Image: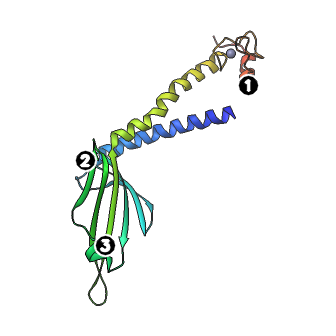
Amino acid sequence: MRRTLRILRVALALLSLLLCIALVVLWIRSLLAPPAAATGLVNLSPYPDRWFLYAQGGTMLLARERSILDPADVPRGLKSGIDKRSVLGFGIERWQQSHNWPVDRGTITYGTDFKAYYCPLWSCFVLLLILPLIELPRMIRDFRRRRRGLCMNCGYDLRASPSKCPECGASINKKQKEKLLLPSPR
Ligand SMILES: [Zn+2]
């Protein structure tokens, strides 16, 4: 159980680290793109409630697009302009758009309602970096303990007693036991 949890933690830390690298690429691309262009757009769900995730000018956005298809709702329901609330680059934006869909005779007017939750890309970066920063020193420590034949629990030298740690009583796993029976590298 403990071993499974550790593997899971290490896997999550590595995934987090990979996402950090992807985020830096996205960050640079979003800063190079024209201000209105969405970079790295990912469609999370189809209509009627379409969610997508993208970057724009150093900001990460999670947006929902909802269609207002009922013609009766469109003319009076559509608001012009952007409803914006933000603090320190974190915030919510809401806007509506009217579309004309050409059909045989004339057009059908419908609206789309957008709601975007956004945050600065650096904040996602910091958040994703927490786990690797916690996990990496532990991974290095475990790697060194395993290689030097030290107790994985307390770091005590096990080369003289390769059955159980005399310091903390931790049992030694099979893999490490096999290693301890080999002559230590000089
Ligand atoms: Zn120990």
Query: For the residue labelled by badge 3, is the local secondary structure a helix, a strand or a loop?
Result: strand
Q: Is residue 3 left or right of residue 44?
A: right
Q: Between marks 2 and 3, how big is the CA–CA gap?
A: 31 Å
Residue 157 in the image: state x and y as whole percent: 67, 11
Q: Is residue 93 left or right of residue 178?
A: left
Using the image, tell me which numbered label, if any, was put on residue 173: 1
Up/down of 146 relative to 5, above or below: above
**Label 2 with label 1: CB-CB less than 8 Å:** no
**Label 3 with label 1: CB-CB less than 8 Å:** no
Of all residues, the one furthest to the bottom in this rendering is 105
The residue tagged 3 is: 111
Residue 83 in the image: state x and y as whole percent: 25, 58
Residue placed most toward the observer, 75 or 14: 75
Q: Quadrant of the C terminus?
A: top right
The nearer-to-camera label among 2 and 3 is 3
Q: Quadrant of the N terminus?
A: top right
Q: Earlier in the sequence, mark 3 or mark 1?
A: 3
Q: Could you tell me how many numbered marks the image carries?
A: 3
Would you identify the image quadrant in which residue 154 lies? top right
Quadrant containing ligand 1 reads: top right
Up/down of 74 relative to 146, above or below: below
Type of amino acid under label 1: Asn
Query: For the residue labelled by badge 1, is the local secondary structure a helix, a strand or a loop?
Result: loop
Q: Is residue 63 left or right of residue 4?
A: left
Residue placed most toward the observer, 89 or 8: 89
The residue tagged 2 is: 32
Residue 84 in the image: state x and y as whole percent: 26, 54
Q: Earlier in the sequence, mark 2 or mark 1?
A: 2
